[in-house]
Amino acid sequence: MSTYETNARLEQRDRALDLASRYEAHSAEEVLQGAIRSEFPGKIGLVSSFGTEAAVLLHMVSRIDPYVPVIFLDTWKHFPETLSYRDALIERLGLCNIQTVTPRPAGVAADDPDGELHKRNPDLCCHVRKTLPMFQALRGLDCWITGRKRGQASTRSELALFEVQDRWLKVNPLLNWQAEQVAAYYEAHDLPEHPLKGQGFLSVGCAPCTRAVRPGEDARAGRWAESEKTECGIHFGGGKVVRGNG
C-alpha cells in the first residue's frame, strides 16, 4: 500500500471517529439529517433490502429528502413477497430515487448457470449476486446508510455509528435500537409490516437461504441457517469480506 493510500485510510478512520463522537448523543433522525444535509450532501445513499425492519430508515429518509438514492440489490433470488413489499413502500413513502441493481448476467451465467450455486458455494453466490453489484452501485457515493443493529446478532455487537469500509464511510443510525423501538416506530407512523414477518421471518434475504426464526433464536438465525455463514459479504472490515464466522 502506498503512502498516499495509507494516509487516505487514516484520514477516513479519523473522520469516522470524529463523526461518531459528534453524533453519538443524537437521535437516529438527527444523525440521518446531519449526514444527508451537512456531512455528505449529494454523496450519500441508503442501501435497503426492503426487509422486515427496512421501513424505519426508508420513512426517515423520505421525510428528510425523498431524492436520496435508495439502492436495492435484486439478486434474482428474492421472495416474491419482498418485491411486492418494496413496490408498496416506494409508493407509500413517495421515494423518488430508487436504484435497482442486479448482477451481471454474464457473471451469473459463468458462475451459476443452473441457479444452484447457493447450495454448492454460498459465499461465491453472494459475491456474484451481491458484493460485485454493490461496489458498482456505490461508485458515485462517499457514504452509505445501513440498517444494521448491534442486537441483531453476536457478529454485529460492536458496530460503530460511523465506520470505514474501503474508500467509503458507512453510517448505522439504528445501531442501538431494540426490536421494541422498531415496533413502536412502525405503529407510530402506521407503516406496513413485511408480509413474511408474521410467519416468523425476522430477517429476510434470498429465498433459498432464508428460513423462519425459531423461538429463542436471534433475529438473523434464519439466514444461512445450516452453515457457519453469517453475512453476505457486502459488509467487511480491514480489507476482508465478512463471511462465515470470520
Image (cartoon, rainbow, N blue to C red):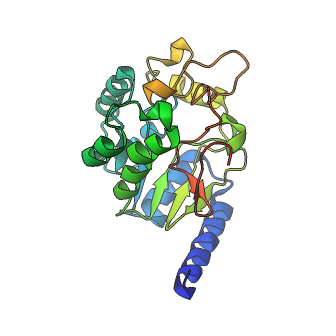
- For this orientation, the residue located farthest to the top is 199
Which of 227 and 196 lies nearest the eye of the viewer? 227
Q: Quadrant of residue 88?
A: top left
Q: What residue sits 53% from the left and 22% below the top?
A: 187
In the rendered view, does 51 fall on the left or right side of 67?
right
User: Measured from the top left, where is residue 207 in percent x and y?
Assistant: 44, 25
In the rendered view, does 232 fall on the left or right side of 219?
left
In the rendered view, does 15 fall on the left or right side of 215?
left
User: Measured from the top left, where is residue 124 in percent x and y?
Assistant: 47, 44
Q: Is residue 33 visible?
A: yes
Quadrant that contains the N terminus: bottom right
Q: What residue sits 59% from the left and 46% below the top?
A: 243
User: Measured from the top left, where is residue 4 in percent x and y?
Assistant: 53, 85
Q: Is residue 176 above or below residue 87?
A: below
Q: Is residue 167 above or below residue 200?
A: below
Q: Is residue 54 visible?
A: no
User: Measured from the top left, where is residue 99 in percent x and y?
Assistant: 30, 46
In the rendered view, does 48 fall on the left or right side of 69?
right
Q: What residue sits 52% from the left and 62% below the top?
A: 169
The mark total stands at: 0
Which of 240 and 35 lies nearest the eye of the viewer? 240
Which of 132 and 122 lies nearest the eye of the viewer? 122
